[in-house]
Amino acid sequence: MTKLVLLLLAPLLLNASKILSYNIYDRTDRVDVMITFDTPFEGKIKQSTSSSKIVIKLEGASIETSKSKVLDSKFLNSINIVPLATYTKIIALVPSSVKLKASKTSDAYGLRLRFSKTIASTDILSSNKVNASTNQRSSLPTKPDSKLSSNYYIVIAILFLGIVILFVLKNKMNTPNNRKKSNSWLFKVANDSKGNTSDEVSIRFQKNINDENSVVMLDFVGQSYLVLMGSNNILLDKFTDNKPVTQDDFDTILQNRHEELDNFLNESETPQEKDPMQVYKEKAANISYTV
């Protein structure tokens, strides 16, 4: 008779997924039991619960020998895995407030049994109170739309008034008198045939002599100025017709004035008997300086 029963159950045992291993993960808020199968587990999972015990029935799963584990956890006291004829029984001893949630992995090669505490009624009541207070805050009366609209227009008017004030101040700062006061004695504002003024200065060429000094070719009102800039700004020459066009032309001018540049640099490194600004002005006005 026993042989007949085993013969009838043989197809079921051959198609059953074999439990290869199980691992227990004790967390602060739960305990997870991960069961691994050799083939995708397609059987049924049945569960029965009592005050201190949860029984899981895995139909279509088998295990070679019984397994048991005792834990020191507030979610799971012990677990026993017992092989039976056509299914595997898992018996978990748990506190009365613990519930079980079983879920398979996406490939069905694994099964997770999660033991965690149920939500107490006091927690539900407190959650409801929080939701109620949130709803009360969200239903507080707001300002009428008309008052909000009036405040919006006031803010727009203040911003517009500020823009107008800034525009007026900018125009006052750009008046001819202010521009005349801000012009340097070197770069005088020139009037064209139509009476318009042009005071834009652009850099044509520039070359560093050392870490502190450089020679710059500036364009201003149709003329070019060769200026030594550094610790002392000195006008070296002024060009009206024969302006340098290329970088090579500029380098040639610097080579021709090599000694002159050395003299200016040496004078800047030693005590000056002449006022550098006086030398600068006299050079610009083509006045020869005599001691």
Image (spheres, helix red, strand yellow):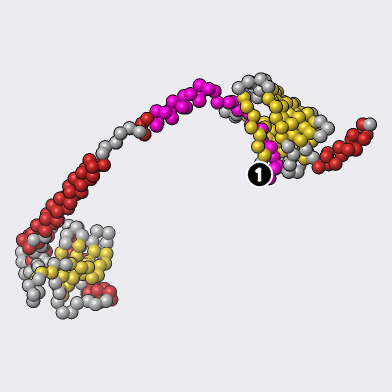
Q: Quadrant of residue 221?
A: bottom left
> Where residue 99 sits in the image (x, y, percent)?
62, 27
> How many numbered marks does the figure carry?
1
- Image quadrant holding the N terminus, namely top right
Location of residue 186 (image quadrant): bottom left
Residue occupying image coordinates x 90% and y 34%: 5
Image-quadrant location for residue 240: bottom left
Residue 194 visible in image? yes
Q: Which one is nearer the viewer's eye here, 207 or 201?
A: 201
User: Which kind of residue does numbered mark 1 sit on?
Assistant: Ser
Rendered position, 235 above or below 114: below
Whether 192 is drawn above or below 99: the answer is below
Q: Is residue 169 left or right of residue 13?
A: left
Question: x, y percentage for residue 153?
Answer: 20, 47
Asked whether 32 or 224 is in front, the reply is: 32
Could you tell me which residue is drawn at 65 percent across and 37 percent down? 103
Neighbor class of circle 1 (other Cα within 10 Å; few <14, some 14-19, many 20+) is few
With 84 as the anchor, is 140 left or right in this view? left
Residue extending farthest bottom:
241
Which residue is disc 1 drawn over?
A: 106
Determine whether the residue tagged by mark 1 lies in a helix, strand or loop. Answer: loop
Question: Which portion, as a residue range, is magenta?
Answer: 107-135
- Split into 4 quadrants, where in the image is the C terminus? bottom left
